[in-house]
Image: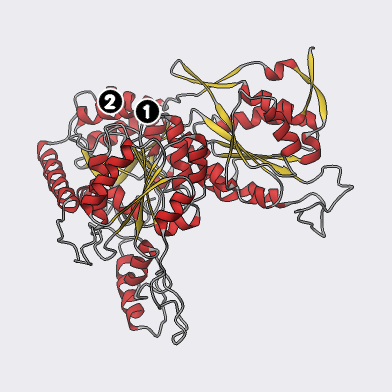
Amino acid sequence: MKTRRMTMAQALIEFLKQQHVERDGREHAFFAGVLGIFGHGNVAGIGQALQQNPDFPYILMRNEQAGVHMAAGFAKASNRLRTFACTSSIGPGATNMITGAALATINRLPVLLLPGDIFARRNVAPVLQQLESPTTQDTGVNDCFKPVSRYWDRIYRPEQLITSLPEAMRVLTSPSDCGAVTLALPQDVQTEAFDYPEELFRKRVWLIRRGEPDRESLERAVRAIRAAERPLIVCGGGVLMSEASQALGDFVAQTGIPVAETQAGKGALAWNHAQVVGAIGATGSLAANRLADTADVVIGIGTRYSDFTTASMTAFQNSNVRFVNINTAEFDAYKVGAIPAVADARVALEKLGAALGGHKVAAVYAAEVANLKAIWDAEVDRLFHLSGQGSGNEGKPAQSEVIGAMWEAAGERDVLLSAAGSHPGDLHKLWRTRTPNGYHMEYGYSCMGYEIPGAMGAKLADPSREAFVFLGDGTYLMAPSEIATSVQEGVKIIIVLVDNGGFASIGSLSRSLGQGGFGTRYRVRDVKSGQLDGETLKVDFVANARSLGAHAIKAATLDELKEALKDAKAADRTTVIVVETDVLAGVPGYDSWWDVAVAEVAEMEGVREARVRYEEARKRERHHL
């Protein structure tokens, strides 16, 4: 057997370069390169290996967590057919990646994490940044990755790569089990040499399977749909990941069944498709939520039924409601007592359509769907063009008007990206997605700080699309540093930064709980009260963005915002547009609710009143068994 003498790190990089995936006859290199920051735990191993492989790009990040976010954004925009590996030193560099790992696993996105680790030979311990345990020497901070990784291993000997790497790829390319994969790499082992078999470095193509539903489950699903009078589809992220938009469009055109969208599934069909009734759940549309309330069969496609999708299990109130779930993951297919069809979304939709033949919803239900859709479209138009009919806060535009201006500026194939704060809820309701993957929302973890690096990943996945980032001042202050990375790499994104003086989303939630927004506004501490209720804290976001290399614009009015968006599209580098909004001009809830527990005992009258409302709302929560 032919061998090649290489360090463990060199062998790892060579292996990653040879991995490809194939689906529907199309082949892709799986890894686009490595993101990260070098330190003493990886510079001599992974760093040296990357230096001698200039054809495998290394991108220097400013924060390790942001590197994982960028990889996740790239994987999501690539429909999980491509990703990056992420490397860090030991200690804080490694633990910085844990939040990103959780995000990737929760959102079922493949990302390979390569944190440095302490010396395997142990004789120089404790090394700088090592966590010691008095009960074992076989633990460290990288063990923290175990609960947020789909696969985890520590490479104590260089030859262990031979068996660990194929297992890592099996998980990364699985339609049902993918997520973060962590290989902890002791810094000494990275530099140790071994005679690796040449076969390890041959080109390997991993087939992305399209699983088919079993016959009995398919027949049960068909019978349930045929018997339904008020069926509703809940379109989840699995539709986009399996590239099943055309199959879904054909299926609903054939059957007339309306389509409600989760955050991850939004945009599988264009907003003006006749059967698309908009967002569902706690951040849902009037049309989708009213149809969900009375639906007798709910067809969940690629969804995991999060509390926002189900409005904390209050969305589906029909006493006889039944569920049909299409999902590659058996774990999700069996949720809510459903008829499970463990299968690829595209394959299952095609087979369902063929089995249903000419079946179509009744004309009266189709008319109801069309009427609710028309009412909802008119409501979005109203919120896009309030023309000063908000709460009148010093002439500042409402957030819905800012979203409208962004939508009008975006092109047919451009992508809108967000993750946290008040923005995901308003965007879920209002953004009118035109093409698949045009709406990129990280809402499995709703992680502040994802937006900028995530958008960079989406832009790298498809440079032909403009990437619009919508985020608040709270998120921006948490992680603006990757703007410098976007300038460094020439990855242009357009950032619309809403300056509303604090955490608007949680402030609104706090007020609804009778707490008056306590601790959510950016104010200096008042000496007399001892609270954060003094003067508003002023931050010059324009100057900050410029200091990081971006083009930056302040838009004081809606008209100025529209002009700034034109300038940003014409610019050749990342642009940050800062706009102040009317924090009190919110978007209504539209028959939705979200379970956030209210204090059962409190001295504050507002909290006591909120508790009464909370207990009443909880009466609508249901178990679907």
Q: Amino acid at mark 2?
A: Gly
**Rendered residue at 23%/56% (across/down):** 557
Crowding around mark 2 (Cα neighbors within 10 Å: few <14, some 14 to 19, many 20+) is many
Q: Quadrant of residue 221?
A: top left
Say which label, 2 or 1, has the lower sequence index: 2
Q: Amino acid at mark 1?
A: Ser
From the image, tell me which residue sits under label 2.
Answer: 353
Residue closest to the eye, 28 or 553: 553
* Residue furthest out toward the bottom: 528
User: Quadrant of the image for the N terminus?
Assistant: top right
The image's colouring method is secondary structure
Location of residue 564 in the rendering, given as x and y in whole percent from the top left corner: 29, 46
Tell me the CA gap for discs 2 and 1.
34 Å
Say whether marks 2 and 1 touch (CB < 8 Å): no
Seen in the picture, residue 251 relative to 392 is either above or below; the reply is: above
Crowding around mark 1 (Cα neighbors within 10 Å: few <14, some 14 to 19, many 20+) is few
* Residue furthest out toward the right: 123
Seen in the picture, residue 89 relative to 219 is either above or below; the reply is: below
Residue closest to the eye, 373 or 623: 373
Label 2 element class: helix
From the image, tell me which residue sits under label 1.
Answer: 464
**Rendered residue at 40%/40% (across/down):** 493
Residue 271 visible (yes or no): yes
